[in-house]
Amino acid sequence: MSRHGVVGKRLGRNVGHRKALLKNLATSVIAQGLKEEPMERHVVTTVTKAKAIRGLVERLITYAKTGDLASRRQAARFVTQKPILSGLFDVLAKRYAKRAGGYTRVLKLSGNRMGDASQMAIITLVEEEIKPKTRKPAPKAKAKAEKKLDITKAEAKAAPAGEAAAETPAA
């Protein structure tokens, strides 16, 4: 059996169970992202589930940033709890208004789960603001430019005016 054109993981579940799992995990990640305390804004799950849910949560936040009725209805297909849906559109859309994507982060935990030894991960919403980078000249280049400028000024002062005029060819 080939996997050509097949997208997503089955997660060992049938279609209905998998959709319910993804909806519940997405709702949990968004609900945790709405909490006041930053240390509580994460969900612990397996690495495979975290990677499967990442794209869905990113899409939901993009719907929230659009903010129109059609986007709200699209998001309501996955987030069925009204307070969490309104928090998604009111709070998270404003938080990520200037960010162009990459709203989630998956961090792998060391060690495995005790029962079945599956690798665990934390999925969380990104917290920091995006700050535009200002380009500054490298310190070495700036120092070289200043040194060269000082040398040319010193040479101009040291050389008499007549000699400097004689050295430069007339055009």
Image: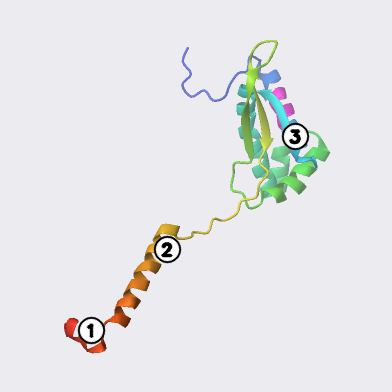
Task: Say above or below: 151 vs 106.
Answer: below
Residue 36 coordinates in the image, percent (x, y): 80, 42
Residue at (32, 74) in percent of width and height:
152
Residue 82 coordinates in the image, percent (x, y): 82, 38
Residue type for callout 3? Val
SS at badge 3: loop
Which stretch is magenta? 19-26
Task: Say above or below: 117 vs 108.
Answer: above
* Residue 159 part of the magenta segment: no
Residue at (64, 12) in percent of width and height:
117
Residue type for callout 1? Ala
Residue in the foreground of this view, choosing between 14 and 107: 107
Residue in the foreground of this view, choosing between 162 and 89: 162
CA separation in Å, label 2 and label 1:
28 Å
Point out the tag, 3 or 1, that comes first from the N-terminus.
3
Task: Say above or below: 158 vs 143.
Answer: below
Kindly give the residue lying farthest to the front in the view shown: 158
Q: In the rendered view, does 157 fall on the left or right side of 127?
A: left
Point out the tag, 2 or 3, that comes first from the N-terminus.
3
Residue at (72, 33) in percent of width and height:
42
Residue 97 coordinates in the image, percent (x, y): 66, 51
Q: Circle 1 sits on which residue? A: 164
Q: Can residue 171 be seen in this view?
A: no
Residue at (26, 82) in percent of width and height:
159
Q: Is the Cβ of the residue at disc 2 closer than 8 Å to that at disc 1?
A: no
Q: Circle 3 sits on which residue? A: 79
Q: Circle 2 sits on which residue? A: 142
* Residue 22 part of the magenta segment: yes
Q: Is the Cβ of the residue at disc 2 closer than 8 Å to that at disc 3?
A: no
Colouring scheme applied when the structure was drawn = rainbow
SS at badge 2: helix
Which numbered disc, 2 or 3, marks the residue closer to the eye?
2
